[in-house]
Amino acid sequence: MRLIFLGPPGAGKGTQAKRVAERLGIPAISTGDIFRSNVSSGTELGVLAQQYMDKGEYVPDSVTNDMVRARLAEPDAAQGFLLDGYPRTTDQVDALDGMLQERGRALDAVIELTVDTDEIVRRLVRRAELEGRADDTEGVVRRRMEVYGEQTAPLTALYAAHGVLRTVDGMGPVDEVSDRIVKALEG
Ligand code: AMP
């Protein structure tokens, strides 16, 4: 299966992506995780990405697309993958389409996780306490939400028009949300 997870910061994408990918036996590929590991190991990519991440802005499309192209070329992604946090812009949608076309593949589904704003704030405050992510501070979270609304939220309409969008309620216990996602993929 080739899947995309969409949703605002704090929707539970990362948590659900790892669980669902494991159930399906495909790799969960998080662009945020790849950037963060480059930041901590101090690579050239990490130094560049951090300038954007610290402000809640998106890393430039060309950089992100090249990174995903390289990741999808690894052998474990040949039988399928779950992309968590990519694509986030229309340019990235086009780039991914190109990568899939080169392989003669198509997307199976795009899962959009929806969560109400109060719950998002609660989850991000909790995550800030538990993980201490540099971009989980109030000002940066606010900017990440804005950027999501401007650049990423419009992608749902685009994927809906292609008939691949499945919207899933992301509220409630983690297990229940995972079950809803798996059911949405079967339906
Ligand atoms: P995430 O872990 O998915 O919340 O991503 C954390 C940060 O990494 C984002 O706020 C961006 O700065 C950067 N990032 C992750 N994925 C992308 C992407 N697809 N395009 C651009 N920037 C990204």
Image: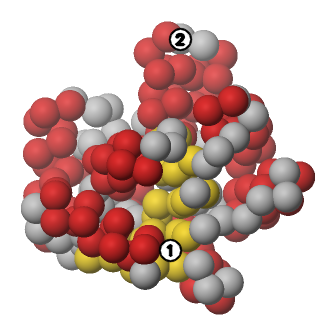
Disc on the earlier residue, 1 or 2:
2
Label 2 CA crowd tier, 10 Å (few <14, some 14–19, many 20+): few
Give the position of the N terminus as an image quadrant. bottom right
Q: Residue at x 49, y 11 (%)?
A: 41
Q: Is residue 182 left or right of residue 80?
A: left
Residue 148 can be seen in this image: no
> What residue does disc 2 label?
42
Where is residue 161? Give x, y as percent.
65, 88
Callout 1: helix, strand or loop? Answer: loop
Q: Residue at x 20, y 31 (%)?
A: 131
> Residue flagged by tag 2: what amino acid is it?
Gly
Where is residue 44? Give x, y as percent.
66, 16
Residue 71 can be seen in this image: yes
> Residue flagged by tag 1: what amino acid is it?
Ala
Distance from Cα at disc 1 to Cα at disc 2: 31 Å
Q: Is the residue marked 2 within 8 Å of ligand 1, measured from its CB?
A: no
Q: Closest to the observer: 46 or 113?
A: 113
> Which labelled disc corresponds to residue 110?
none
> What residue does disc 1 label?
153
- For the view shown, which residue lies furthest in the right direction? 102
User: Are the two marked residues, 1 and 2, in contact with CB atoms closer than 8 angstroms?
Assistant: no
Where is residue 150? Give x, y as percent.
53, 71
Query: In the figure, 64 relative to 10: above or below?
Result: above
Q: Is residue 3 left or right of residue 127?
A: right
- Quarter location, residue 174: bottom left
Q: Closest to the observer: 184 or 121?
A: 184
Query: In the figure, 98 relative to 56: above or below?
Result: below
Q: Is the residue marked 1 within 8 Å of ligand 1, measured from its CB?
A: no
